[in-house]
Image (tube, helix red, strand yellow):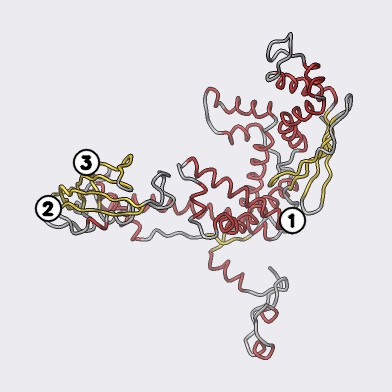
Amino acid sequence: MKTTLTELPESRLRIDVAVPVAEVDKRMDRAAKELAGEMKLPGFRKGKVPAQLVIQRIGREAVVEQALRSSLPEWYEQALREARTTPIGEPKLDVSELPAAGEDLSFSIEVAVRPKAQLGDYLGLEVGRAQPEVPDDAVETELDRLRQGFASLNPVDRTAAEGDLVSLDYRGTVEGEPFEGGEGRDQLVELGTATLVEGFEEALVGARAGDERIVEVTFPADYRAEELAGKDAKFEVTVKEVREKELPELDDEFAAEASEFDSLDELRGEIRSRIGDALERQADDEFRAAVVDAASAGAKLELPEELVKARAEESLDRFLHNLTHQGVDPDAFMQVQEGGREGMLASVMGDAESSLRREATLAAIADAEGIEPSDDELLEALGPGEGDNDPRKMLERLRQSGRDELLREEVRLRKAADLVVDAATSIPHEQAAAREAIWTPDKPRPQDEPGAGDEAEEASKPAKIWTPGP
């Protein structure tokens, strides 16, 4: 198969494909055998009609069309691999005419592709980084969580309040009919946690052992059990016991029971250290993203609206697909979102534009720096594994299928980001914010900004500091 690439305006690419006649004939023969499976001819068993007779019987054009339907997806993927490009959004496929006998098949694919960036400064950037401090209340919150796990539950002879646990039997119906999962015995419910359908826990506040109550609720529209979503339910509830949660004293004895430490001070220190490590990792991640964004902000590239929308569509489709794996109906989920699908799409347009800008900048950096991942780096990206998941076997399978380019590009962009981040200098957020406030010649003057007011009013205001550098 031969491919020819033509760059088009607005970050589009046309791939002209020529499939040799020998390959076309082979695919036609396969298509004829598929069609023969449903064909009956005197003297031949079903599915055993020769390909040439099938072509004579239903016509060459019908067999070519069947061959195209079966083969175009494979040819399309092969063409993209040979072009070493990853499309954005849906492709436009054009098969202008079916090939005559003895001729190659020609078709074209037009796809949106990542735009090319013209780089600005990307090495030696100074970017703000958070200097995290562990809040005292975060340590106390974690200690309280530990105490909750060691709490004792004591039966009490009083009405239930928020924070209490209630042991109960219940039986639910929808439109007078019981439903799966709607009945339970000796269930322990903690009031005030909002873990059950809205209105259920609230209806049990003030109940005491022996009480019988009717609890009416409405299941959410996006409830995981689709047959109950949006429906009204009635529960007959019998309260069997009210229990009060008693937390252990926060002392050295508790520390020894809840951890490997002998004192509360040691436990507090370990919690503070653990939270501090998490905050540092978060600060590192945010700094990395900020450095890449700073390099992207200095690059010049055109991002057509249709390209951004195509990336947003891809992002939204992935999100909705993931919902199905969580047992959530995507259509029902979209119905309860403001603006439906279009509203959700609009909400991710900004992220789509940012991701395209980052990718284009990192790709340009990788090109400028001659970055190419080694086999060891590809294996590391695949991670550890054994048997069929051994990274060497996985990489070999990717190469045989021609899909290793996706992995290679992912690692290449990651290495470009590593290069930019390693060369950057972190400065406190306050210093970075102060620099943003300083006016320089590459920024519009305050009086030139939209909505700045009339000239007389602006002239009466003190001028911002001007500096000759960025």
Label 1 residue SS: loop
- Asked if the residue under mark 1 is in contact with the one under mark 3, i.e. CB atoms within 8 Å, the reply is no
Work out whether mark 2 precedes mark 1 in sequence or the reverse, and give the earlier one: 1
Work out whether mark 3 precedes mark 2 in sequence or the reverse, and give the earlier one: 2
Measured from the top left, where is residue 444 in percent x and y? 70, 75
Q: Considering depth in this image, is 285 or 106 the residue closer to the camera?
A: 106
Q: Which residue is mark 1?
A: 119
Q: Which residue is mark 3?
A: 185
Q: Is residue 279 above or below residue 31?
A: below
The crowd level at tag 2 (other Cα within 10 Å; few <14, some 14-19, many 20+) is some
- Quadrant location of residue 291? bottom right
Work out whether mark 3 precedes mark 1 in sequence or the reverse, and give the earlier one: 1
Label 2 residue SS: loop
Mark 3 or mark 1, whichever is nearer to me: 3
Q: Which residue is mark 2?
A: 156
Looking at the rendered structure, the number of numbered marks drawn on it comes to 3
Mark 3 or mark 2, whichever is nearer to me: 3
User: What amino acid does circle 2 point to?
Assistant: Val
Q: Is residue 246 visible?
A: no
Measured from the top left, where is residue 178 in percent x and y? 30, 42
Q: Is residue 247 left or right of residue 29?
A: left
Q: Is residue 108 above or below residue 190?
A: above
Q: Is residue 57 left or right of residue 321?
A: right
User: What amino acid does circle 1 point to?
Assistant: Leu
